[in-house]
Image: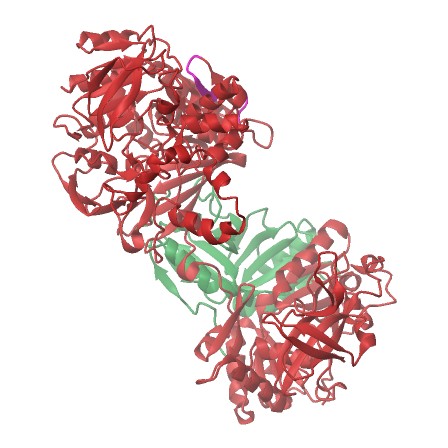
Amino acid sequence: MSTRLAKTGRLVDHSRAIEFTFNGKRLKGHPGDTLASALLANDQMLVGRSFKYHRPRGIVASGAEEPNALVGLGEGTRFEPNQRVTTTELFDGLTCISQNHWPSLDFDIGAVNTHLSRFLPAGFYYKMFIHPRPFWKHVYEPFIRQSAGLGKASNPGDPDRYEHFYYFCDVLVVGGGVAGLQAALAAAEAGSKVMLIEQTAHWGGRAPVDGGEVEGQPVADWITATLAKLQDMPNVTLRNRCMGAGVYDHGYALGYERVADHTPGSDAPRHRLWRIRAGQIVTATGAIERPLSFAGNDIPGVMLASAIRDYAIDFGVSVGDRTVVVTNNDDAYRTAITLKQLGLEIPVILDARQSGGGALADEARALGIRVENGKGIAKVKGGKRVEGVAICAQAGEGAVLEEIKCDAVAMSGGWSPVVHLWSHCGGKLIWDEAQAHFRPDRANPPKGAKGEGFVIPAGAANGTGDLASVVADAHEAGQAAAKAMGRKPKGKAPEASTSVEAPMQPVWLMPQGAGIKLRMKSWLDYQNDVKVSDVQLAAREGYESVEHAKRYTTLGMATDQGKLSNINGLAILSDALNQPIPQTGTTTFRPPYTPISLSSIAGEAKGEIFQPIRKTPMHGWHEAHGADFEPVGQWRRPYCFLRGEEGRHEAVNREIKQTRASLALLDASTLGKIIVKGADAGRFMDMLYTNMMSTLKPGRCRYGLMCNENGFLMDDGVVARLDEDTFLVHTTTGGAESIHGHMEDWLQCEWWDWKVYTANVTEQYAQVGVAGPNSRKVIEKLTEDDISADALTFMGWSEITVAGIPARVFRISFAGELSFELSVPASHGRALWDALLEAGEEYGVMPYGTEAMHVMRAEKGFIMIGDETDGTVIPQDLNMDWAISKKKEDYLGKRAQERSHMADPNRWKLVGLETLDGSVLPDGAYATAPGTNANGQRNTQGRVTSTYHSPTLGRGIAMGLVHNGPDRMGEVLEFPKVDGGIVKAKIVDQVFYDKDGEKQNV
Amino acid sequence: MSEAVTPLNGARVNGLATIADAGLTGMITLRGDLSSAEVKAAVQKATGLDVPAQRQALSGQGAAALWMSPDELLLICDYDGVAETIATLEEALRGQHFLAVNVSDARTYLHVSGTGAREILAKLCPVDLSPEAFTPGMFRRTRMAQVPAAFWLDEAGTFHLICFRSVADYAFNLLKTAALPGGEVGVYG
């Protein structure tokens, strides 16, 4: 029976009770409890089922290392799976459910797997499900997916908010135990700006449980005093409930603060991810006790000795009335002594060491506790909870000497420093023979840009033992960190208690000669159900690398990442391979230390601020007038404007017909606009564009093509010359930033001595395309300036005043009609739009969207970057040799275009495609050619690059790249459709509408 | 002529800090050799201010000079005074290699003020916003969540923040969310 003790529980408030539910059962706890301590106080030993065999499992640990006790926490939109009960603070109204069982926790069908465990060894899935091959997709995978996974996925609609916080400090100390407090104090007293973070709600770590004195006062009092001292220092920031999740290059670290997990529904953000830049990082992350590998070590009630001690002292919870202690070191005696002093029974302490323990063992004996040296557990009796243990000689094969009834087992296999954060960024480890653990190699820390170490381990995380050495080590670490930051630390470490312990003895299997039956019940990885026998099998099958053995057996691959299992597992592997442990090495430690919420990583990015949406000055009008938006980069541009009941297709057709017949408006504000100015601007423009730009006269516009240095087409647009020194470059919407960057790249890195400055003024202007036969008339209504055909000729621009707004008017055409683009300061964009709509009413004016724009340019045979180009297309492919200057010595891409493959006459070239039946060709369809290629695929001879229904012509039109296309006019190609069948299309000229350009020249 | 309107049209919200549309403001991108006597004289003539040092903002009566890059300044003036200021610059820099261009409408300009201002910005921008590190007169071009932004701090403790016009709503909503009550971090101010 686990139950609440009356007199202990330093962290809980006995005077208040709070309610929570587990699997619908109403239970009571106290403020200050973790969910784990509250469950144990209610004798809820069984908390879940294991992953593979569905074995009954209980709480093993008291902290972040807990492998078993994962629950689904919360309800509805706040439901979250796989939450560790040991790190979940209890709050009033908490609800949780156990995981991985069906139909119920107590009676679980899947538990049949445990009886089949002989047939489910390591690598079972790999071996079993490989044949017959087709079965994987149709039988095995669906079946495995059904049974895989621990908790249920959470539900959409998380109501909480999350945030990041950027913080900078000289010294970040991770871990708020005695070592962390002392290291922070030492660094802060030297003048460093210090941040100290602690993953739990409490400061001081485990020291108050184990006692001792620092500076002549009980350690608990010293913690309180030191904390107060740190809180008073202006150069110290303290944060509890904030886990050091990861250490990265250049002193970057992540702190995962669970701000409001314990107060759900409060107005605080639930999690805050601290993105910290620290000069030095001190890892005072403590140590984790290791389990012992004996048969039945996973039965609920078998726990880490330190955890049993923690529950008794911190939370006032006894795990059992009769607790057998089994150990290979002196520390576990503290558990026996603690429990005995609380009036609980310790039937026996089994010490695997033949020579037994030291002073603590004597103390235990003096309390009347039976101590058996050289003994271990042959197996634990019980199913859903511990009923007793069978004792054997550690040196033997497990012959039972005696059976003892008990309801709890406290085990200790020694302590492993928490080296995760030290290792995340490359800190090396050394094997400590005496302690049988890996600890940080101070000589090989993670290194910064100058080759200097930036992480310093402290205290138990550095492998130190008693309180005095922990405090001294932490003091030194704090001072070293401050010194590395240019401070001159002074002062000695405080005095603290020392204790002399007998040496521990590594015990990787209990008993050491355990036969296969025992080994098959000796768990290494509780969460993933990996046993001693599995690791040994992996070694026999040739998985000699620890990384391979890990993946083959799944040892350490669960959500706890092997915090309890890794050292024991690799010791078993080393033994099986007959090599020393350091030679086997460890698997890689990767952030985060324990799982952090994905929401904390996303931070504020949800809902309306999930991502930036770029809006033009007319966006609000579009929203209010039926705009059906499409994303263009981060812009939202109207694809079309829906009216009444009509669909997209009808809307696009209507917009095109209106443009061709009378007047329509396009919001072209998203087009890139870049100013290029300077004495060498003309020379620079000639390098950027394939055609000649330097000869452009002020007041005139020219269409140009831009290639990258590999010769491929990357952007196009209209250039206007503003004055002798200044060009205005129009880029595609998507190209605004990248083309500006491209320009600066060449100016800064290659032509740094050219006198050219650029400025991206894309957002300075609202731009409206005014298109259609009535476009001149509508602008004339709004201006007194002369924009007649004679005053403003095709491809000319001038400065005018429209609707009282200063504007540039460009007489250019992408739609193929008479059209103008008006550019005004963005703050007046909406006013211009409104004025044009009002003035255009008599012409039935309406806006048109990007799709109408695309169809109309295709009718005119104009290319579109991203449709006709895909990063592998050169201007020559598009028959645009007319836009490539023959006079210029050089332009970006020129030499690349002279390479043999680029000049190859067999390159596919642009043509128009006209379906014989008038249908619309499928986008991206390939034209087939006779025969097959080396892969047995049909040969191809061309592909569709743009394809639309043209309302102007009343049939499908398309452009495509075709082998020898321009020489094959009139030939019919076959394009297979996705749903089978073939569309036949004739090769035609790409200009379908107004070939002579009479419409735009009026 | 129509009234010019800012993208946020005077929006304002109070939370852990006050976030407010700073209104129409003249902004001029000036590129040139910032170390040259001519540019120094031109900036002085146009704004009454010196050329700011790296990451510095110099403020005067209705004007400011902000350091954008080793060869670029952003000059702040009255919205209606832009043409005149550019004319002054062009006159003073005649014959020099430079670029002066009006970008007043390309940006949204916000004031973030109040005790929570530092923490709110530190939630969104990877900048050390502690009072000892970021002091009045400093200017920083940075990232605010997913968009480019820049800000400077005046003597009264108000942050002046600019970002592109098209993302005005996003920027405002970011700051508004970061300023929601309950989100106090408790490290600054």
Q: Please name whichever residue, B138 or A823, is drawn nearer the observer in this view of the structure.
A: A823
Q: Is residue A560 magenta?
A: no
Dominant secondary structure, magenta: loop
- In the rendered image, residue A373, in percent from the top left (x then y), is placed at 29, 9
- In the rendered image, residue B130, in percent from the top left (x then y), is placed at 43, 42
Q: Is residue A435 magenta?
A: yes
Q: Is residue B70 above or below residue A652?
A: above
Q: Residue furthest front?
A: A132
Q: Is residue B167 above or below residue B17?
A: below
> In the image, is A20 to the left or to the right of B102?
left
- Judge whether residue A405 can be spotted in this image: yes
Q: Tell me the quarter of the image containing the N terminus of chain A.
A: top left
Q: Is residue A941 above or below residue A971?
A: above
* Residue for point 73% across, 54% down: A746
* Colour displayed for chain B in the image of the structure: green
Q: Please name whichever residue, A725 or A660, is drawn nearer the observer in this view of the structure.
A: A660
- In the rendered image, residue A613, in percent from the top left (x then y), is placed at 49, 64
> In the image, is A410 to the left or to the right of A762?
left
Q: Which residues are magenta?
A: A434-445
Q: Quadrant of residue A320?
A: top left
Chain identifier of the red chain: A
* Residue for point 68% across, 63% down: A870
> In the image, is A522 to the left or to the right of A821?
left
- In the rendered image, residue B112, in percent from the top left (x then y), is placed at 41, 55
- Judge whether residue B123 can be spotted in this image: no
Q: Quadrant of residue A184?
A: top left
